[in-house]
Amino acid sequence: MSTATEHRTFDSVNPASGAVVGTHPLHDAEAVRAAVESAGEAAVWWAGLGFDGRRRRLLDFKAVLTQNLTRVAALIGEETGKPIGDATLETVLAITHLDWAARNAPKVLGRRRVPTGLIGINLAATLEYLPLGVVGVIGPWNYPLFTPMGSIAYALAAGNAVVFKPSELTPGVGVLLAELFAESVPERKVLQVVTGLGETGAALAADPGIRKIAFTGSTATAKRVMAACAANLTPIVAECGGKDALIVDEDADLAAAADAAVWGAMSNSGQTCVGVERVYVLDRVYDEFLREVTDRALAVRSGEDYGPITMPAQADVIRRHVGDALAKGGKAVVGGVDSVRPPYADPVVLTDVPEESSAVREETFGPTITVSRVATLEEALRKSNAVAYGLGGTVFSGNVRRSMELARAMLTGMTAINSVISFAGVPALPFGGVGESGFGRIHGADGLREFARPKAISRQRFAIPGMNLTSFGRKPADLERLVKMVTFLHGRRKS
Ligand code: NDP
């Protein structure tokens, strides 16, 4: 791509060391336009390959990505500062999703016959899910490969071309992903990357050639992106933040629950949209659970077990939430306001935090957790559901029926039982939230359909004499026969 502004660049920086990792072009609206336009041509070619051709190439892409696993993980580590083990796990998860999307697209989206009902007995009806064209993906920095791959793999498998705008904090991962894709699909620009700051993403959302935007990031930015999409009536799938709760039942394995709570809250420095931010524990096991959490949190080391705060401005948010919790009467049993010492933040465990404080209601995105005592599971559920977000959640219980009931009653898109975040690793499960956490789904069959348009076709196989209903030649007797038939089919009450 060549544009007038290509000489303008920005750096991506390792947040732990401050070292420059890479320099990338600041693509403006004109450059975005050029990318979307060439993606439009590529989309026609890619759709024309059909399921088999795309599947073969996407599985090749998966192989190339797997062969470059170490290189990709190293770059994720450099751009986010996260430990190499976490970056490796992220890459493996992205690979499994790519594999699932490639293999399952034909079954989920392919043409199938559907029943026509007695009134449509002379029809043959088919349903299939066709590509949209060019999909714009706007990705975040916390999981710069895994998260956008949840849209990119599914959009590609559904037959679309993709223009991906990675976060300005992690552009290199996006650029490398597109390079590896081009190794397996060299013919056309089916996956392109545009780099830049927020304005580049805004230009992508506003581009008239984009048929859908897949956005991951904050709720506030999702609203801005939606407003830009409104100009062209471009649909959007929005994966925003969360304030996920973990409920601990009386008969839960407390050591396992504490381990999950601490890892769910602190790993990746808490910068996980489905990270654990709040815990509600039944009174009888509260003290023991808190002891288990405290011991574990004290042993976790920032800079070793997890990396730095990737986005510098986040330090103020974490500090504000911890400060607000303490000012409103909460206690810090591990850490405190001083735990935030950029670029790192040490673990913070808060108790007795009033439900109206920002540490309970707003997304903290830091290695902090609130632990609250509740009298009943109903209270735990009511408090879990009392925030504007509704992304994920966790239940620890020894009772399968009760844990399933709680999971289903959580006002979220996903819940893990006796494990944490496990739903994100199951490619067949849809991922997404409700309320301020956004709408639409990535992953799974729903994630494939999110990037396709249902195409319904009805074909008349033969004419039924005396049932010429959609014609000005219709006779009163035709209608009489229809009413008789409908009365026979639908006119009887069941009770
Ligand atoms: P943003 O929502 O601002 O950024 C997400 C993506 O949107 C980035 O690629 C960003 O680009 C892009 N973007 C920014 N402004 C626009 C715009 N006007 N139009 C189109 N795209 C735009 O998140 P932040 O990085 O500022 O993080 C803020 C908070 O969001 C965090 O504290 C956290 O609470 C939440 N968050 C949640 C994530 C999740 O997984 N759900 C992921 C990341 C953040 P650029 O980076 O170049 O500005």
Image: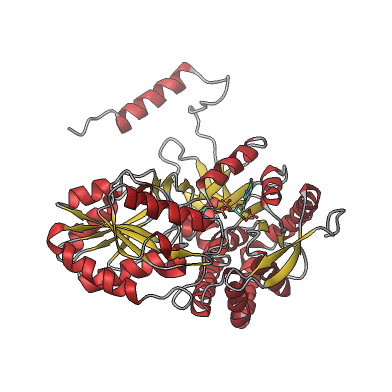
Position of residue 93 relative to residue 151, above or below, is below
* Foreground residue among 229 and 167: 167
Q: Position of residue 89 (x, y in %)?
A: 49, 76
Residue 46 screen position, x and y as percent: 70, 61
Whether residue 374 is situated above or below residue 90 in the rendered picture? above
Quick check: 91 left or right of 46? left
Q: How many marks?
A: 0
Q: Is residue 422 visible?
A: no
- Quadrant for residue 273, please give it: bottom left
In the rendered view of the protein, which quadrant contains the C terminus?
A: top left
State the residue at coordinates (15%, 64%).
285
- Kindly identify the residue that appears in the image at 38 percent across and 23 percent down: 483
- Name of the residue lying farthest toward the left: 284
284 left or right of 178 in image = left
x and y, in percent, of residue 473 in the image:
57, 20
Image coloring type: secondary structure
Q: Dividing the image into 4 quarters, which one contains the N terminus?
A: bottom right
Vertical comparison of 116 with 392: above or below: above
State left or right for residue 107 relative to residue 277. Answer: right
Residue at point 40%, 59% (across, down): 337
Could you say where residue 22 lies in the image, as x and y percent from the top left? 72, 70
Does residue 178 appear in the picture of this structure?
Answer: yes
Above-or-below relation of 163 to 474: below
Q: Depth check: 471 or 20 in front?
A: 20
Residue 104 vs residue 42: left or right?
left
Q: Residue at x 15, y 52 (%)?
A: 376
Q: Quadrant of residue 223?
A: top right
Q: In terms of image quadrants, where is residue 23?
A: bottom right
